[in-house]
Image (cartoon, helix red, strand yellow):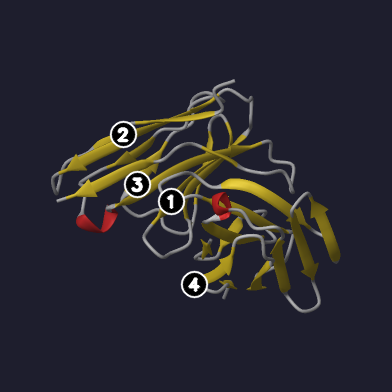
Amino acid sequence: NAGVTQTPKFRILKIGQSMTLQCAQDMNHNYMYWYRQDPGMGLKLIYYSVGAGITDKGEVPNGYNVSRSTTEDFPLRLELAAPSQTSVYFCASDSGEGGNEQFFGPGTRLTVL
Amino acid sequence: GQNIDQPTEMTATEGAIVQINCTYQTSGFNGLFWYQQHAGEAPTFLSYNVLDGLEEKGRFSSFLSRSKGYSYLLLKELQMKDSASYLCAAMDSNYQLIWGAGTKLIIKP
């Protein structure tokens, strides 16, 4: 099993550009999450999904969009990138059974200049 | 509001024992997680507590007191590879994780 995979690993964007961060998992997990992690801060939930076709906002959704057309894939779209979106983005998944651990992808380091 | 507090940084000596504390305030509570995160890497799961008491897993143990909103992670026989950030996260009534900022643990020889 590859677990949770993310692409790209690194990206530099100019202000106003758009991009999609890809995330895929091969563990047949229903629940998937997008977090951002700023230096010295805890993980902040951007969006999450409890199954294909279902998505919901987390704590910091502004400036982002997601879709979940399959169980495996959960892409994150940034529209009109801003310097405040410079961060490390982690995708995670779990089986959705309360106390089960979340499995994380390796992260995408995004810089907006 | 919801809040997780843990120390920013701790230093310990190789071979010693260190305890990392975490206090939490959440809307509802469905358990407390500890994750380890090495610099530049993703978090990896260490432990989960939902009932009061101590859970031991090798060199790592985690304790929970629900009445006090308090948990700690105990690391024994410290090794240099234990140098990392340790993230405390509480699961709220919506089964979402509220994350602390992490405790950076520095191990000295």
**CA distance for labels 2 and 3:** 10 Å
Which is more foreground, mark 1 or mark 3? 1
Identify the residue under disc 4: B8
* Residue at the (67%, 49%) spot, across then down: B46
Residue A20 has which mark?
2
Identify the residue under disc 3: A64
Q: Which percent across, then down, holds residue B94?
A: 66, 56
Q: Which percent across, then down, holds residue A36?
A: 41, 52
Identify the residue under disc 1: B39
Q: Which amino acid, mark 3?
A: Tyr
**CA distance for labels 4 and 1:** 15 Å
**CA distance for labels 3 and 4:** 29 Å
Judging depth in this view, the residue of A50 and B63 nearest the camera is B63
Q: Which chain is mark 3 on? A: A
> Element type at marker 4?
loop
Q: Which percent across, then down, holds residue B44?
A: 59, 45
Residue A33 has which mark?
none
Q: Is residue A30 left or right of residue A56?
A: right
Judging depth in this view, the residue of B52 and B73 nearest the camera is B73
Q: Which amino acid, mark 2?
A: Thr
**CA distance for labels 1 and 2:** 25 Å
Tag 1 and tag 2, C-beta contact below 8 Å:
no
Q: Which amino acid, mark 4?
A: Thr
Which is more foreground, mark 3 or mark 4? 4
**CA distance for labels 4 and 2:** 33 Å
